[in-house]
Image: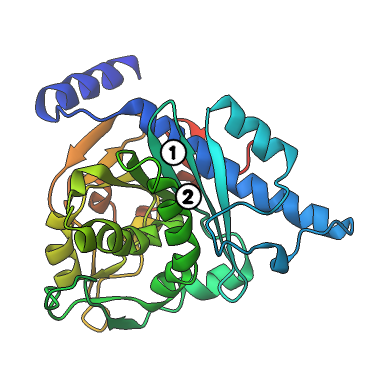
Amino acid sequence: MNIIFFITLFFYTINYSFSYDTTLINTCTQLISLEYCHHIDNNNSNNNNNQNNDNDYDNTNGKLNININNIFKKELDKMHIIPQSIIFNNTYDTHGFVGYSTKKKQIYTILRGTNSFINWMDDFDIKLINYSYPTTQNNICINCKVHQGFYLYAMSVYNDVYNAIKYIHSTHPTYELIFSAHSLGSSVLFIALKIQADIYILNNKNNKNNIHIITFGSPRLGNKEFAKIISPLINNMRFTHNRDIVPHMPLSIPLFPFMHLDGEYFENEYGIIKYCDGYENNNCSNKYSLYETNTNDHMYFNNHYLGCIY
């Protein structure tokens, strides 16, 4: 076992050298886990006749106006992150939050992954719908199509996210924008694309280097045209874990020609991470057939459980 581990480590080190901000990645995984806990706790609170209900989620001015639970606030305090706005849509059961750190000079948008029956309905709403990249110029995303359920899940909370980020951005215009999520929540990419247009392009400040999209266990979000046209426009870090089934979904078949965006950070069974370029690289998660995948690997990255751990 040890011999195999060290041989594998040596091979990866020689052939797949890359670097990324491990502190940022760890922050994202913690925030994702915390988001799962946050709404579990809110649901329990509702059962105890507390006042946290759908009507409390009003982010018109980008300001937080809900009493978040103690665990959520306590853990954010430890991370030096200030919660700005709680994100919620009842129709698609979309959950998330926007917060920022004056210490790290970053603004975080986090979306929750699949956690309810409604979310499963979002997942299986696999119709491909037309997508236009949101710019003031002519549409550059010709023949682009995206997964309807994923798109509606994310964009149902776009206005709330935009108002919150705009509010923070007005006093902290140089802060990095971090969009991160797990599983279904990886559709946060759609929000990031429109934020990039609404805040930067419309203000003649198209600096994609200030926006980072970091996802874990993301499904395929759109078709080949979408993947190839959008990939160069954004900073997207897509992390996958070993035999996780979700990156293989939806299936890429003639009727539904889905494709991942360019690039993948793949964690193998030994916890070693390597980078694979390309859209469907057979040296990373795509090397496994659908029959070789599992659901357990979907919930872990770098030994961190991507669910409620608090």
59 and 77: which one is in front? 59
Residue 243 in view (yes/no)? no
**Name of the residue lying farthest toward the front:** 171
Residue 104: x and y, percent?
40, 28
Which image quadrant is residue 55 in?
bottom right
Identify whether 74 is placed above or below 97: above
Amino acid under label 1?
Cys
- Image quadrant occupied by the C terminus: top right
**Disc 1 designates what residue?**
28
Q: What residue is shown at x 80% (from left), y 53% (from top)?
A: 44
Q: What residue is shown at x 51% (from left), y 56% (from top)?
A: 113
Residue 123: x and y, percent?
47, 70
Q: What residue is shown at x 15% (from left), y 24% (from top)?
A: 11
Amino acid under label 2?
Ile
Identify whether 269 is placed above or below 295: above
For marks 2 and 1 on the same chain, the one whose residue lies earlier in the sequence = 1
Q: Secondary structure at mark 2?
A: strand
Q: Secondary structure at mark 1?
A: helix
Which image quadrant is residue 267 in?
top left
- Image quadrant occupied by the N terminus: top left
139 and 188: which one is in front? 139
Residue 117 in view (yes/no)? yes
Distance from Cα at disc 2 to Cα at disc 1: 8 Å
Circle 2 crowding by C-alpha within 10 Å: few under 14, some 14–19, many from 20: many
Mark 2 touching mark 1, by CB under 8 A? yes
**Name of the residue lying farthest toward the right:** 49
